[in-house]
Amino acid sequence: MYISFDRKRVAAPASASPVSRVSSTVVILGVVSLLTDVSSESVASILPLYITGALGLSTIAFGFIDGLYQGVSAIVRIGGGWASDRSDQPKWIAVFGYGVSALAKVWLLIASGFAAVVGVITVDRLGKGVRTAPRDALITAASDDSNLARSFGVHRTLDTIGAAAGPLLAFVILSVLPTGYEVVFVVSLCFAVLGVVLLALLVPARHPRAERVSRGEPRAPFRWRNLAEPRLRRLMLAAGMLAVLTVGDGFIYLVLQDRSSFAAQWFPLLYVGTNVAFFLFAMPLGRLADRLGRARVFVVGHVALLGAYAFAALPVGGIVITVACLLLLGAFYAATDGVLAALAGEFAPAGNTASGIAAAQTVVAVGRLIGATSFGFLWFAAGREAAVIIVAIALAIAIPLMLVLVGPLVTAKATT
Amino acid sequence: MNGRMRAIAAVLATVLLLGGAAAYCITAIVGSLGNRSAASALPATVSHDDDARVVFRNTDAGSGYGLVASVPAEQPTTTRDMTGVPCDRVAAAADSLLCLRIDRGILTTFSASLIDGDGTVVESWPLPGIPSRARIAPDGSQLGFTSFVTGEAYATIGFSTATQIIGVDGTDHGNLESFTLLIDGQEESNVDRNFWGVTFTDDDNSFYATAATGGQTWLVRGDLAARTLISVRQTAECPSVSPDGTRIAYKKNVSNGAAAYWSVAVLDLTKGDETVLPDTRNIDDQVEWLDDSTLLYAVARTGAVGDSDVWSIAADGSAASEIFIEHASSPTVVRP
């Protein structure tokens, strides 16, 4: 797999060969995301340490804050998509989102106390909510239909490399400087600012609606009701149903930890393992999605999740089971995260790309929240293994049904 | 700006910002080098003498930061005896240490270790997150430790603490989540049950701990043989039984808002009276009894990252708190 910087790429027709190159804009957006994720994840990973070790407080209240954030972020994400489509300025809306997160890092340097830290993290995540949809709209605008999922794969690869590298960077700093939280914050700020600067300087400002008009195509004003486009609606229905059966990696990690001394020892870092698997698979699965049909790969990608459930439910432990689970979870994210954005970008009516992507991502986020919450109850009512087996059976039934549901989306793609 | 100028500006910004970050790191590392003392030259065990000693974690940034140290309980301001043992949370008995540690590195993990009187690590257990509380039974027979459950980047509901009790004879009583919890006589099996802060009595079977569900906390009395936890009193966390076994000190959330604010309180087990002590700061520690009339707890130093002092206060609330050991946390009193 290669990534090329090809600034002279002309808008290729939809029938372009499947080896068409990934736009340099996509790569730059990937690098911006990498830098920003190094910044956010380095701080996020040491935050519990900072609160308990440096501020001398318990982290008990933290779960509550996270739940609150989930709700707000859904609204903010839709807002970011709307602002992007409405203004026809996805780049500058994205710059605003990244900028808000960078400013939060400045505040982190002068903030003290639990409330201030929570405020900083909330602002950081609000920035993330705002920028996601316009950024994904920029990726869509810069890509051909023939390589859309691969473009998202390239972006998610770089993004996830940042998410895996951030915690490692932070822990390296703290292993040398046991109380060097401020050093982590300063480094985090530098990465965040660099991300915003590179985005502002290097990413061309696209105006999807104005560009349509200049190409002589009909005007495509932003309309909320465009989000009810039948294919987009079908996608959101399938993605939402599958999201409800996605229980949250934390539960899988807890099952593994119970059974394997290897998983118990590495428990706090299992999510980094999942991220590594995610970035290894993101590009190949994106490419596969472009070839075999993105909707198909999106649904079949849940087989990897089913596999992770199955391994977790097996009454054996050990390194092999743990590693297999992490690889499968990573493959699941690689087959679904970027591919969902590509699908939403493809199906969203002209002029509604960002809000269409935001709507699909929000449906999935809300679905997963419902899934994780309900699974929490099942976990205690039925017991750990039984709960996992029940969800696995439900998912095994849902996957073929959803494959039928998205069938028209796959053929629709082939005829365009 | 044309494309070329943009490219030059981007390169400049990259060099400046990444270079600046690197320079800041190097400056901080160089600045900290002078403050290091060689842990290898220090003893691996805590000093012993015929009188009670207070074992604690040294938080003096100047020397031996994070290492276990001790002072005589009668003369806490004398020069501390340092060990070479780094712990983030420590508990001690006459001949052993329970050391909860952040194993720092590129891949940071967390562990609990039992260290014997020769300084040998007898056994280690992995922890699912940042160390929180550690206790050894007065006779050294049982270990209780609590850690946070961190690293769940995607799941944020429920699980925030994990508490284990382990007998030094090898009996693993497991996670308190697997015990039957009875609140006011009713079995409680809510999803969001959490347990933390064990304290042992001297009878080898019973202990106290904190149970939480639905945003409320209870002081619970645990029975290792029956594997039950029975509520004693609401709104009490991180209990600590007095040496004579008649009272329990704990932190009590006195806030009405969403964010907790803790004061220290003492419950008389026979009379059922609760006394809230006159230290109005937010106290987030598991209290330790210096003797039957005095309590110890750590309070973070404001403005100093990762530094705290151990304070003492009269257990009957008759006097204000005062500094007991500077630059210290996680105190345990080891009685001969």
Image (cartoon, coloured by chain):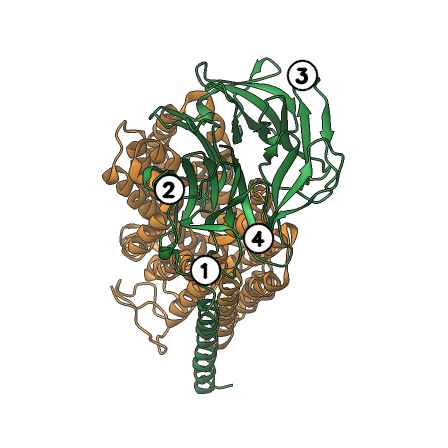
* Residue labelled with disc 4: B327
Q: Secondary structure at mark 4?
A: loop
Q: Secondary structure at mark 3?
A: loop
Q: CA distance from mark 4 to mark 2?
A: 32 Å
| Front-lying residue, B8 or A227 | B8
* Residue labelled with disc 1: A37
The chain holding disc 2 is: A
Q: CA distance from mark 2 to mark 3?
A: 43 Å
Q: Is residue B142 above or below residue B113?
A: above
The chain holding disc 1 is: A
Q: Which mark is residue A267?
A: 2
| Front-lying residue, B319 or A7 | B319
Q: Mark 4 or mark 3, which has the lower sequence index?
A: 3
Q: Which mark is residue A377?
A: none
Residue at 55% of width from left, 49% of height from top?
Answer: B328
Q: Amino acid at mark 1?
A: Asp
